[in-house]
Image: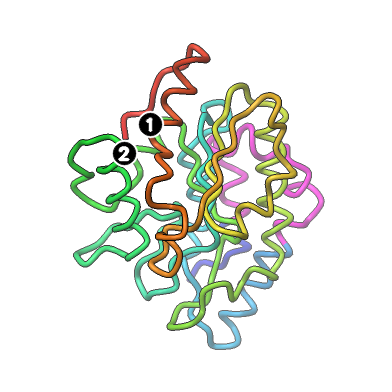
Amino acid sequence: MSSYEAALAAFLATPASEGWRDLVVFRDGAAARACVRADAEVAAGHVVAPAPGRVLAALATTPFTEVRIVILGQDPYPTPGDANGLAFSYVGPPPLPRSLVNIHRELQDDLGAAGPASGDLTAWARQGVLLLNTALTVREGASKAGSHLALGWGAVTDAVIASVSARRPHVVFLLWGNPAQAKRGLIDEARHLVLASAHPSPLSARRGFFGSKPFSRTNAWLEAKGEKAIDW
């Protein structure tokens, strides 16, 4: 079985990591230490999600030079089988994760169009939407959300956010939930747009996610900057 440490090394050896691999966290051992801790969780008998081969899927699917949007969530879905390495994305049979159901609902209300046919958000990622969580792994199981927020992934995702802010032009950062909003200080708001709201979780969606119109506001800002809109 592949380990998270081995998956990191494999990612850094691929062309998909170009633009990401020069971040200091991939050179100073910070990312490797987070992977070692995730492997230790597995060794202790915990089931960890997503699988090692998907832990860096967000960076692998959206090249650094193509990032135009960052959707920042908290951590992967803890429900067994739901997480796939892209924040909020889901590939599998119904029912969809409840946060994703609420994202689809807001998308339909915002744009007045039918929602996506599935929960797979890979099409967004391939348009430059970086689907990033503040932690890249989680223990699977009920009440395990947030279980890896202190595992060391924060240094990695902070570096990703700060680098995108410093080196990419005209990026929209969608910060959904308190852990995501805590990263706001890493973003240069003189250059980028930040749209912060409640998390789409059923526990909080009615406290500011519904009605926030993130999709239309994102596209309007991109088009005002001469950038192509996202086909949500």
Which numbered disc, 1 or 2, marks the residue that appears first in the sequence?
2
Q: Return the residue nearer the eye: 42 or 177.
A: 177
> Which residue is at a point 37% across and 28% down the rendered structure image?
230
> Which residue is at a point 66% across and 43% down the rendered structure image?
160
**Picture quadrant where residue 231 is located:** top left
Range of the magenta residues?
8-32
Q: Is residue 107 left or right of residue 221?
A: left
User: Mark 2 — residue?
Assistant: 110
Q: Return the residue nearer the eye: 199 or 22.
A: 199
What kind of residue is marked 2? Asp
What kind of residue is marked 1? Ser
**Picture quadrant where residue 100 is located:** bottom left
Is 163 rendered above or below residue 11?
above
Which element is circle 1 on? helix
Q: Are marks 1 and 2 in contact (CB under 8 Å)?
A: yes
Find residue 223 and report its horizontal and vertical position in percent. Answer: 44, 17
Quadrant into which the C terminus falls: top left
User: Mark 1 — residue?
Assistant: 216
Q: Is residue 11 left or right of residue 232?
A: right
Find residue 187 and report its horizontal and vertical position in percent. Answer: 70, 37
Q: Residue extending furthest bottom?
A: 45
Q: Residue extending furthest right?
A: 28
Q: Is residue 102 left or right of residue 187?
A: left
Q: Badge 2: few (under 14), some or many (20 or more) residues near its Cα, within 10 Å?
A: some
